[in-house]
Amino acid sequence: MSAKEEILARITSALHDAPVPAPIPREYRKGSDMPRAELIELLVDRLEDYKAHVDVVEQEELPATIAERLRDAASYVVPHGIDEAWLADAALANDGRRRIDAPGAVLSVTDLDETGAVLTSSAVSIAESGTIVLDGTPSQGRRAISLVPDHHVCVVPVSSIVRLLPEALPRMDISRPLTWISGPSATSDIELERVEGVHGPRRLDVIIVKGL
């Protein structure tokens, strides 16, 4: 028996005659019928309140919008599973700025620290809290690439937006590494002075895409 198994066995033994807890009341809202246009409006309002920059575009406008948001980056990283059509704008074609992070060819922390921006997709977004969730799938990449560069450009498909957290949870694979983003990284821990970029990007650009 391993140490872990022994500890769990002792806990099980100690609790064998414990009373069964009463059911937990779950009377909170679990769903919403908010129209899609209002969902977008609510998410935009929350994200802008967090000082994120938000674009709402049609699918055909996405490559040009991404190019505009990455225009000032000396270099940028993309996960290996990013949709190449998103990078089809002439301003991004063969300009030498792109770095690809892929399994077996991951960028070092130093490489990421020297990279100006990162472009990712997203898994699900919660309008009521203004939260965007990344889950490490190929279009989003590993957690480090969205935390180290100072500028994060995040694509949010309209189809991935829900109003409430209980609606978002069934869409997530909780066995994956989840990154929850509610605006640019910020803290007010020290003397209530807001400082941005302490444990993540200082800038967050969100591109909400209709038709995706």
Image: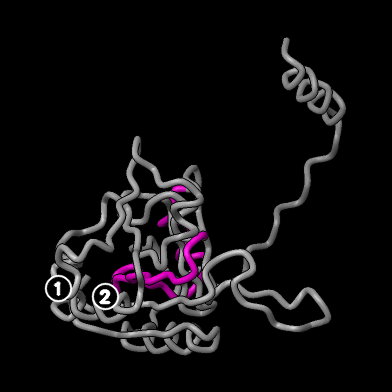
Q: Using residue 39 as the reference point, say whether residue 130 is left or right of it.
A: right
The kind of residue tagged 2 is Ile
Q: Nearer the viewer, residue 49 or 86?
A: 86
Report the residue at 46% width, 78% height from top: 127
The kind of residue tagged 1 is Asp
- Check the image and report above or below for 180 versus 196: above
Q: Using residue 78 as the reference point, say whether residue 144 is left or right of it.
A: right
Query: Residue 9: x, y in percent?
Result: 78, 20
Q: Mark 2–mark 1 contact, CB under 8 Å?
A: yes
Report the span colored magenta. 148-173
First in residue order: circle 2 vs circle 1: 2
Report the residue at 39% width, 79% height from top: 33
Distance of label 2 from label 1 (alpha carbons): 8 Å
User: Which residue position is annotated with label 2?
Assistant: 66
Q: Residues within 10 Å of mark 2 (few under 14, many from 20)?
A: many
| Magenta span includes 159 | yes
Q: Which mark is residue 187?
A: none
Q: Nearer the viewer, residue 209 or 83?
A: 83
> Label 2's element?
helix
Query: Residue 126: x, y in percent?
Result: 47, 72
User: Which residue position is annotated with label 1?
Assistant: 89
Report the residue at 12% width, 73% height from top: 90
